[in-house]
Amino acid sequence: MAGASLLTLLDDITALLDDIATMSKVATKKTAGVLGDDLALNAQQVSGVNADRELPVVWAVAKGSMLNKAILVPAALLISAFVPWLITPLLMLGGLFLCFEGAEKLAHSKEEQLEHPALAEPLTPEAEKEKIKGAIRTDFILSAEIIVISLGTVATASFIHQVSVLLVIAVVMTVGVYGLVAGIVKLDDAGLYLLQRGVTTKSAISRAMGRFLLTLAPWLMKALAVLGTIAMFLVGGGILVHGIAPLHHLIGHWGEQGGQYGGLVEALVVNGANGIVGLLAGFVVVIALHLFKKLKN
Protein backbone atom coordinates (compact mmCIF):
# COMPACT_ATOMS: atom_id res chain seq x y z
CA MET A 1 0.00 0.00 0.00
CA ALA A 2 2.81 2.37 0.97
CA GLY A 3 4.66 1.52 -2.24
CA ALA A 4 1.57 2.21 -4.34
CA SER A 5 1.04 5.55 -2.57
CA LEU A 6 4.67 6.51 -3.22
CA LEU A 7 4.37 5.61 -6.90
CA THR A 8 1.14 7.65 -7.16
CA LEU A 9 2.88 10.61 -5.52
CA LEU A 10 5.85 10.34 -7.90
CA ASP A 11 3.48 10.09 -10.86
CA ASP A 12 1.64 13.23 -9.70
CA ILE A 13 4.93 15.09 -9.26
CA THR A 14 6.08 14.01 -12.74
CA ALA A 15 2.78 15.16 -14.28
CA LEU A 16 3.03 18.48 -12.42
CA LEU A 17 6.61 19.05 -13.59
CA ASP A 18 5.62 18.15 -17.14
CA ASP A 19 2.74 20.66 -17.03
CA ILE A 20 5.02 23.33 -15.60
CA ALA A 21 7.63 22.69 -18.31
CA THR A 22 5.00 22.93 -21.05
CA MET A 23 3.47 26.12 -19.64
CA SER A 24 6.92 27.65 -19.09
CA LYS A 25 7.80 26.94 -22.73
CA VAL A 26 4.63 28.70 -23.89
CA ALA A 27 5.29 31.66 -21.56
CA THR A 28 8.89 31.92 -22.81
CA LYS A 29 7.69 32.10 -26.43
CA LYS A 30 5.18 34.80 -25.50
CA THR A 31 7.85 36.90 -23.76
CA ALA A 32 10.64 36.32 -26.32
CA GLY A 33 10.27 39.80 -27.84
CA VAL A 34 10.51 41.55 -24.48
CA LEU A 35 13.46 39.34 -23.51
CA GLY A 36 15.28 40.55 -26.63
CA ASP A 37 14.62 44.15 -25.62
CA ASP A 38 15.72 43.31 -22.07
CA LEU A 39 19.04 41.97 -23.39
CA ALA A 40 19.66 45.06 -25.54
CA LEU A 41 18.76 47.44 -22.72
CA ASN A 42 20.91 45.72 -20.11
CA ALA A 43 23.91 45.40 -22.43
CA GLN A 44 23.52 49.13 -23.07
CA GLN A 45 23.52 49.88 -19.34
CA VAL A 46 27.12 48.67 -18.88
CA SER A 47 28.48 50.69 -21.79
CA GLY A 48 31.01 53.23 -20.56
CA VAL A 49 31.92 51.16 -17.48
CA ASN A 50 35.63 50.64 -16.80
CA ALA A 51 36.83 47.29 -18.19
CA ASP A 52 37.75 45.92 -14.76
CA ARG A 53 34.32 46.87 -13.39
CA GLU A 54 32.15 45.37 -16.17
CA LEU A 55 31.47 42.00 -14.54
CA PRO A 56 30.93 43.45 -11.03
CA VAL A 57 28.40 45.91 -12.52
CA VAL A 58 26.60 43.11 -14.41
CA TRP A 59 26.56 41.03 -11.21
CA ALA A 60 25.19 43.97 -9.19
CA VAL A 61 22.39 44.55 -11.72
CA ALA A 62 21.66 40.79 -11.87
CA LYS A 63 21.24 40.70 -8.06
CA GLY A 64 18.96 43.73 -8.29
CA SER A 65 17.02 41.95 -11.03
CA MET A 66 16.47 38.90 -8.82
CA LEU A 67 15.26 41.17 -6.01
CA ASN A 68 12.88 42.83 -8.50
CA LYS A 69 11.41 39.46 -9.37
CA ALA A 70 11.18 38.44 -5.70
CA ILE A 71 8.91 41.48 -5.30
CA LEU A 72 7.09 41.21 -8.64
CA VAL A 73 6.08 37.54 -8.62
CA PRO A 74 4.07 37.64 -5.36
CA ALA A 75 2.80 41.17 -6.18
CA ALA A 76 1.55 40.03 -9.61
CA LEU A 77 -0.20 37.01 -8.10
CA LEU A 78 -1.87 39.14 -5.41
CA ILE A 79 -2.96 41.87 -7.84
CA SER A 80 -4.23 39.28 -10.31
CA ALA A 81 -6.23 37.57 -7.57
CA PHE A 82 -7.74 40.61 -5.83
CA VAL A 83 -7.48 43.72 -8.06
CA PRO A 84 -6.83 42.54 -11.64
CA TRP A 85 -8.02 45.89 -13.08
CA LEU A 86 -4.95 47.53 -11.51
CA ILE A 87 -2.44 45.63 -13.70
CA THR A 88 -2.96 47.72 -16.85
CA PRO A 89 -2.66 51.17 -15.16
CA LEU A 90 0.48 50.07 -13.32
CA LEU A 91 2.01 48.71 -16.52
CA MET A 92 1.15 51.95 -18.33
CA LEU A 93 2.91 54.00 -15.65
CA GLY A 94 5.94 51.75 -16.08
CA GLY A 95 5.74 52.10 -19.87
CA LEU A 96 5.55 55.90 -19.57
CA PHE A 97 8.62 55.84 -17.32
CA LEU A 98 10.50 53.77 -19.93
CA CYS A 99 9.57 56.31 -22.63
CA PHE A 100 10.72 59.14 -20.34
CA GLU A 101 14.06 57.41 -19.67
CA GLY A 102 14.60 56.90 -23.41
CA ALA A 103 13.80 60.55 -24.20
CA GLU A 104 16.00 61.77 -21.36
CA LYS A 105 18.82 59.55 -22.57
CA LEU A 106 18.54 61.04 -26.07
CA ALA A 107 18.49 64.59 -24.70
CA HIS A 108 21.46 64.00 -22.41
CA SER A 109 23.49 62.18 -25.07
CA LYS A 110 23.03 65.21 -27.34
CA GLU A 111 24.18 67.55 -24.58
CA GLU A 112 27.20 65.34 -23.83
CA GLN A 113 28.20 65.31 -27.52
CA LEU A 114 28.10 69.11 -27.58
CA GLU A 115 29.98 69.52 -24.31
CA HIS A 116 32.41 66.58 -24.60
CA PRO A 117 33.05 65.72 -28.25
CA ALA A 118 36.12 63.68 -27.22
CA LEU A 119 35.99 60.18 -25.80
CA ALA A 120 33.99 59.82 -22.61
CA GLU A 121 35.82 59.81 -19.28
CA PRO A 122 35.81 56.60 -17.20
CA LEU A 123 32.91 56.44 -14.78
CA THR A 124 33.43 57.61 -11.20
CA PRO A 125 32.25 55.28 -8.39
CA GLU A 126 29.24 57.57 -7.81
CA ALA A 127 28.33 57.55 -11.52
CA GLU A 128 28.70 53.76 -11.57
CA LYS A 129 26.28 53.41 -8.65
CA GLU A 130 23.78 55.64 -10.45
CA LYS A 131 24.17 53.54 -13.60
CA ILE A 132 23.46 50.36 -11.62
CA LYS A 133 20.39 51.94 -9.99
CA GLY A 134 19.11 53.08 -13.40
CA ALA A 135 19.63 49.60 -14.86
CA ILE A 136 17.74 48.00 -11.96
CA ARG A 137 14.85 50.49 -12.37
CA THR A 138 14.63 49.69 -16.09
CA ASP A 139 14.83 45.96 -15.34
CA PHE A 140 11.93 46.33 -12.89
CA ILE A 141 9.59 47.61 -15.61
CA LEU A 142 10.65 45.05 -18.21
CA SER A 143 10.45 42.27 -15.63
CA ALA A 144 6.95 43.43 -14.64
CA GLU A 145 5.80 43.18 -18.25
CA ILE A 146 7.34 39.73 -18.67
CA ILE A 147 5.79 38.50 -15.41
CA VAL A 148 2.35 39.84 -16.42
CA ILE A 149 2.59 38.27 -19.90
CA SER A 150 3.67 34.97 -18.33
CA LEU A 151 0.83 35.15 -15.81
CA GLY A 152 -1.60 35.69 -18.68
CA THR A 153 -0.54 32.40 -20.27
CA VAL A 154 -1.39 30.46 -17.08
CA ALA A 155 -4.39 32.54 -15.94
CA THR A 156 -6.72 29.51 -15.96
CA ALA A 157 -4.20 27.13 -14.36
CA SER A 158 -4.07 26.19 -10.68
CA PHE A 159 -2.28 28.43 -8.19
CA ILE A 160 0.67 26.02 -7.84
CA HIS A 161 1.11 25.99 -11.63
CA GLN A 162 1.02 29.80 -11.76
CA VAL A 163 3.62 30.16 -9.01
CA SER A 164 5.88 27.49 -10.51
CA VAL A 165 5.78 28.93 -14.05
CA LEU A 166 6.47 32.47 -12.82
CA LEU A 167 9.42 31.24 -10.75
CA VAL A 168 10.85 29.30 -13.70
CA ILE A 169 10.48 32.32 -16.01
CA ALA A 170 12.01 34.65 -13.41
CA VAL A 171 15.11 32.47 -12.88
CA VAL A 172 15.61 31.54 -16.55
CA MET A 173 15.16 35.13 -17.66
CA THR A 174 17.66 36.52 -15.15
CA VAL A 175 20.32 33.86 -15.69
CA GLY A 176 19.88 33.91 -19.49
CA VAL A 177 19.85 37.67 -19.98
CA TYR A 178 22.65 38.56 -17.58
CA GLY A 179 24.74 35.57 -18.60
CA LEU A 180 24.58 36.81 -22.21
CA VAL A 181 25.30 40.39 -21.12
CA ALA A 182 28.38 39.20 -19.21
CA GLY A 183 29.54 37.30 -22.31
CA ILE A 184 29.00 40.32 -24.57
CA VAL A 185 30.91 42.77 -22.38
CA LYS A 186 33.85 40.36 -22.19
CA LEU A 187 34.11 39.74 -25.93
CA ASP A 188 37.11 42.06 -26.19
CA ASP A 189 38.92 40.14 -23.42
CA ALA A 190 38.22 36.87 -25.25
CA GLY A 191 39.54 38.44 -28.46
CA LEU A 192 42.73 39.60 -26.76
CA TYR A 193 43.25 36.15 -25.23
CA LEU A 194 42.84 34.42 -28.61
CA LEU A 195 45.15 36.91 -30.31
CA GLN A 196 47.90 36.42 -27.71
CA ARG A 197 47.40 32.65 -27.78
CA GLY A 198 47.65 32.70 -31.56
CA VAL A 199 50.93 34.59 -31.38
CA THR A 200 52.31 32.12 -28.80
CA THR A 201 51.16 28.98 -30.62
CA LYS A 202 51.62 30.47 -34.10
CA SER A 203 48.01 29.66 -34.92
CA ALA A 204 46.65 31.81 -37.76
CA ILE A 205 43.06 30.78 -36.94
CA SER A 206 43.38 31.86 -33.32
CA ARG A 207 44.93 35.20 -34.34
CA ALA A 208 42.18 35.79 -36.92
CA MET A 209 39.44 34.98 -34.41
CA GLY A 210 41.07 37.26 -31.85
CA ARG A 211 41.26 40.18 -34.29
CA PHE A 212 37.65 39.57 -35.35
CA LEU A 213 36.36 39.65 -31.75
CA LEU A 214 38.43 42.75 -30.93
CA THR A 215 36.95 44.51 -33.97
CA LEU A 216 33.43 43.24 -33.28
CA ALA A 217 33.23 44.08 -29.55
CA PRO A 218 33.12 47.92 -29.72
CA TRP A 219 30.76 47.90 -32.71
CA LEU A 220 28.45 45.42 -30.97
CA MET A 221 28.34 47.55 -27.80
CA LYS A 222 27.55 50.67 -29.85
CA ALA A 223 24.81 48.79 -31.72
CA LEU A 224 23.32 47.48 -28.47
CA ALA A 225 23.40 50.99 -26.98
CA VAL A 226 21.33 52.24 -29.93
CA LEU A 227 19.03 49.20 -29.86
CA GLY A 228 18.59 49.58 -26.10
CA THR A 229 17.36 53.16 -26.48
CA ILE A 230 15.05 52.16 -29.34
CA ALA A 231 13.76 49.27 -27.20
CA MET A 232 12.74 51.75 -24.49
CA PHE A 233 10.41 53.49 -26.94
CA LEU A 234 9.16 50.25 -28.51
CA VAL A 235 8.40 48.53 -25.20
CA GLY A 236 7.15 51.66 -23.42
CA GLY A 237 5.10 52.78 -26.42
CA GLY A 238 3.73 49.26 -26.88
CA ILE A 239 2.54 49.18 -23.25
CA LEU A 240 0.87 52.60 -23.61
CA VAL A 241 -0.80 51.64 -26.90
CA HIS A 242 -2.07 48.36 -25.45
CA GLY A 243 -3.65 50.26 -22.54
CA ILE A 244 -5.50 52.74 -24.79
CA ALA A 245 -8.11 50.63 -26.59
CA PRO A 246 -8.98 53.01 -29.50
CA LEU A 247 -5.31 53.60 -30.29
CA HIS A 248 -4.55 49.88 -29.97
CA HIS A 249 -7.33 49.02 -32.45
CA LEU A 250 -6.24 51.77 -34.85
CA ILE A 251 -2.61 50.63 -34.94
CA GLY A 252 -3.77 47.01 -35.16
CA HIS A 253 -5.87 48.00 -38.21
CA TRP A 254 -2.85 49.68 -39.81
CA GLY A 255 -0.87 46.53 -39.11
CA GLU A 256 -3.51 44.35 -40.77
CA GLN A 257 -3.43 46.56 -43.85
CA GLY A 258 0.35 46.33 -43.95
CA GLY A 259 0.05 42.58 -43.44
CA GLN A 260 -1.32 42.30 -46.98
CA TYR A 261 2.27 42.84 -48.11
CA GLY A 262 3.71 40.30 -45.67
CA GLY A 263 4.25 39.66 -41.97
CA LEU A 264 7.43 41.72 -41.90
CA VAL A 265 5.58 44.83 -43.14
CA GLU A 266 2.87 44.27 -40.52
CA ALA A 267 5.49 44.01 -37.75
CA LEU A 268 7.27 47.14 -39.01
CA VAL A 269 4.02 49.14 -39.09
CA VAL A 270 2.92 48.09 -35.60
CA ASN A 271 6.35 48.45 -33.99
CA GLY A 272 7.02 51.70 -35.83
CA ALA A 273 3.73 53.15 -34.57
CA ASN A 274 4.46 51.93 -31.02
CA GLY A 275 7.92 53.49 -31.21
CA ILE A 276 6.55 56.86 -32.38
CA VAL A 277 3.95 56.85 -29.57
CA GLY A 278 6.72 56.03 -27.09
CA LEU A 279 9.01 58.77 -28.45
CA LEU A 280 6.27 61.41 -28.32
CA ALA A 281 5.12 60.34 -24.84
CA GLY A 282 8.70 60.38 -23.53
CA PHE A 283 9.45 63.88 -24.80
CA VAL A 284 6.08 65.18 -23.54
CA VAL A 285 7.07 64.03 -20.03
CA VAL A 286 10.60 65.47 -20.38
CA ILE A 287 9.23 68.86 -21.50
CA ALA A 288 6.53 68.82 -18.81
CA LEU A 289 9.10 68.12 -16.09
CA HIS A 290 11.43 70.79 -17.48
CA LEU A 291 8.60 73.38 -17.42
CA PHE A 292 7.58 72.27 -13.92
CA LYS A 293 11.14 72.78 -12.63
CA LYS A 294 11.28 76.24 -14.25
CA LEU A 295 7.96 77.26 -12.68
CA LYS A 296 9.04 75.87 -9.33
CA ASN A 297 12.26 77.91 -9.41
Image: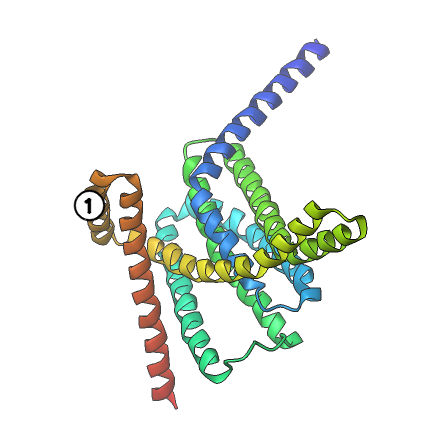
On the image, the x and y values in percent for residue 29 come to 45, 37
Relative to 161, is 170 above or below?
below
**Location of residue 61 (image quadrant):** bottom right
Residue at the (19%, 43%) spot, across then down: 257
The quadrant of the rendering that contains the C terminus is: bottom left
On the image, the x and y values in percent for residue 233 come to 37, 60
Judging from the image, what secondary structure is the residue with disc 1 in? helix
Along the viewing direction, whichever of 44 and 187 lies nearer the viewer: 187
On the image, the x and y values in percent for residue 126 come to 63, 76
Seen from this angle, which residue lies furthest right? 200
Residue at the (64%, 55%) spot, across then down: 211
Question: Counting other residues with Cα less than 10 Å from the Cα at mark 1, is it few (<14), some (14-19), or many (20 or more)?
Answer: some
Figure label count:
1
Q: Tell me if I can see residue 194 in this picture.
A: yes
Looking at the picture, the colour scheme in use is rainbow
Relative to 166, is 231 above or below?
below
Along the viewing direction, whichever of 229 and 15 lies nearer the viewer: 229
The quadrant of the rendering that contains the N terminus is: top right
**Location of residue 199 (image quadrant):** bottom right
On the image, the x and y values in percent for residue 230 come to 40, 60
Name which residue type carries label 1. His
Relative to 207, is 118 above or below?
below
Residue at the (50%, 80%) spot, across then down: 117
Seen from this angle, which residue lies furthest bottom? 297
Relative to 47, is 172 above or below?
above
Q: Tell me if I can see residue 81 in this picture.
A: no
- Lateral position of residue 212 relative to residue 31, left or right: right
Residue at the (73%, 54%) spot, across then down: 193
| Tag 1 residue | 253
